[in-house]
Image (cartoon, coloured by chain):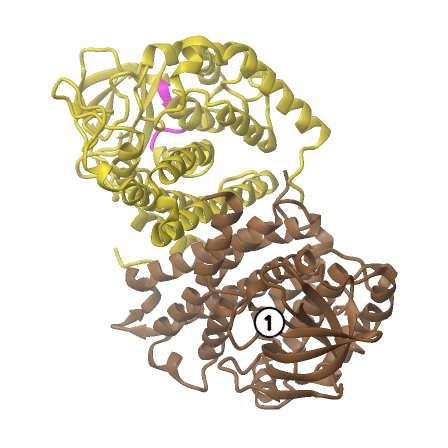
Amino acid sequence: MNFAFSEEQEELRRTVRQFLEAKSPETEVRRLMETAEGYDTSVWKQMGQELGLQGLAIPEEYGGQGFTFIELGIVLEEMGRVLLCAPYFASAVLAANAILNAGTDAQKAALLPPIATGDTIAALAFTEPSGKWDAAGITLEATPDGDHYLLSGEKMFVIDGAIADLIVVVARTAGTTGTEGISFFTVSGNAKGLTRTALSTMDMTRKQAKLEFDKVVAEPLGAPGAGWPAFSKTLDQAAVALSNEMMGGAQKVLEMSVEYAKVRVQFGRPIGSFQAIKHKCADMLLEVESGKSAAYYASWAAAEDNEELPVVAALSKAYCSEAYFHATAENIQIHGGIGFTWEHPAHLYFKRAKSSEIYLGDPTYHRELLAQRIGI
Amino acid sequence: MDFVDTPAEAAFRAEVRAWLGEHLKGEFAALGPGNGPSDETGWEVRVEWEKLLGADRWVGLTWPKQYGGREANVAEQIIFNEEYTRANAPTRLSFFGEGLFAPTLIQFGTEEQKQRFLPKIQNVSEMWCQGFSEPNAGSDLANIQTRAVLDGDEWVITGQKVWTTLAHRADWCFVVCRTDPESSSHHGLTYLLCPMNQPGIEVRPLRQMTGSAEFNEVFFDGARTAKENALGPVGEGWKVAMATLGHERGTAFMSSQLAFEGEFAQLLEVAQKNGAAGEPALRDELARSYAGLQVMKYNGMRMLTNLVKTGAVGPEASIGKLYWTTWHKSFGETAMRVIGADALTVQCAQDGRYEIDDLHYVFMASRAETIYAGASEIQRNIIGERVLGLPREPR
């Protein structure tokens, strides 16, 4: 039993942290969140060419570095810490894993190398206006048309869907329900019949889009109609990845709170000397550390791709979501009035936390998945 | 990061499993897991069982070999606990002696003291209790008033200890006394080892809300112990006591995790029988409770990995103590809601005595857990001040 990161993994964390502190300070986050595309192309290039981050967990045979979900989790934790504005989660986590899970060897060999270098930004379109995160939420229909399929319907809350070069779409064969008839397709971001509308997001640091499909020509990814296992696995992996990202942000707001509690003086002494504040910080630490334990363990299960993954994915998403949101809410309370202002970063984390809590399904939803998966 | 047994760990696991398979039979197997360190059910049978464990050095698992231990590493400790719990083996009696006192003794004791006390913990011929809390030294533990003075080559102890678990079963007590009458707070204290069976000691049971009386008041009225029975330097008992508390908050509760898994399984069975598992709100509570329990396990593994690296239980142990006690209390409350109307009655009330089943016991006994071994508020102070570096409360 060894529940610690290796020296190489710690080194990766230091490298990524150093890079992100230089490239994604709060001023940059604020600048980019006001832009339509929501990321900086030169930083994105450096991430791909200098650090190889986009291809970190993509196998070497497909142009990646061949690291595991543990390393991917570390990188995401660091990105969550600084609220990096970049299509990393969409491209390197959601789309890349969907392709790895669903694609044939030839499709992986064709699609993954440019994602691994960052030259292609990919997105995964699955949720629809119903806001459901499971198979039942997939109603967009795929109709065979010669060598291709035609997609018609609407996708919502597609992270970085407006800027993606490649869209991986989860669709359904007409006349099927539930987990039957689920298929993956790929379409180009500028495909004919595809209308992309950027959404105004509560969390401005992460862009989302509405995608309307009107008989869009699409290539199947993997065997049509048999996509549910790959989709389910992609969702579990995404939950694990997001859990790690959330804990990076949670650790950051804890540090902000503690720092402020040490220097803010009221009644003639630092507010952190009052038990009312000290105990809040202690509870935050407990939840942040516990959330990390869950997220790291989930990363390991995802790296091993073992039978524990579905259980720990649901478990960590439920726990980390609540821990992160609670930490960001307490951070505002500890900061008092200043914490409620636009100029203070507390609200950026608060909004990211609530968005991440809801995205992929809220904690109640994930506890229901957990209940089913452990046989309650 | 790796949670799979190494070949050596797998061999150790097989050894533990084989031993339990061979010995856990008949009246021992019939006992089943009980309710934690203070549970007295089936005491005599459990003493016999503990002696079997001791004879094959499962008591003293982590001790150095020169004292009869196996020098088991952290992974082996976890494996032993896992297999022990999986086998539904009886609750251990060794919490205070093996769990709290022995590691403190190994850290601070003289060679003579280790030779004198460790073998008798291992062969279960001497049981221990913990003399820390007093009526006016609860959360403010440093306000200890029990005094000890040297009379020739003996310490003479006068004062009162309270909440002393299993004092009525114990042969020895590790008792923190004020040996410098001019001192105050954490200065001038000494960690003494005192035999319980003597005229100067009176043990009075304290009946708890559970109806049972595992706690006691212990009155020292001129109780005597030999001069050499001070553990660590005279006047530096606070440091030694803190080491014991570190074990109490940290590693000693490792096996609780597994007991909790058993309790959860028991509750789940109830929930599936009475339909609570299909009721959305209770289903959510059960899933939340399960998630919390797994997170506790992951926390424990991280803490223990860190322990192996640094060799010491740091103030982070307070996070563990705060976590498990809070979780357990909440689990007890969930249990009552899941049981529903049937929770209104206790199942085992006989002869007019107030007796309760396991889940009622958890519901009630867990209230004590956020109080003893440093109340949750004390743990939060420790976390705030020693882990996060926040300024101290003016005292």
Vertical position of residue B26 compared to residue A46: above or below: above
Residue A186 picture location, percent across and down: 76, 74
Q: What chain does mark 1 sit on?
A: A
Which colour denotes chain A? brown
Residue A70: give x, y in percent of width and height.
68, 55
Residue A32: name its quadrant: bottom right
Q: Is residue A160 visible?
A: no
> Which residue appears at 46% of the width and 33% of the height?
B258
Any part of residue B86 in sight = yes
Residue at the extreme left: B352
**In the foreground, A228 or A58:** A228
Q: In the picture shown, does residue A212 fall above or below A14?
A: below
The structure residue drawn at horizontal position 43% and vertical position 49%, both measured from the top left corner, is B287
The magenta region covers B229-235
Where on the picture, by quarter, is residue A26?
bottom right
* Residue A46 image position (x, y, % from top left): 77, 77
Quadrant location, the N terminus of chain A: top right
Amino acid type of the residue tagged 1 in the rendering:
Thr
SS at mark 1 in the image = loop
Residue lying farthest to the front in this orientation: A175
Along the line of sight, the residue nearer the viewer: A72 or B385: A72
In this rendering, position of residue B57 left or right of residue B120 = right
Q: Residue at x 56, y 15 (%)?
A: B21
Relative height, residue B174 to residue A52 (above, below):
above
Chain in yellow in the render? B
Viewer-proximal residue among A63 and B48: A63
The question of residue B59 being in magenta is answered with no
Q: Nearer the viewer, residue B175 or B287?
A: B287
Residue indicated by mark 1: A139
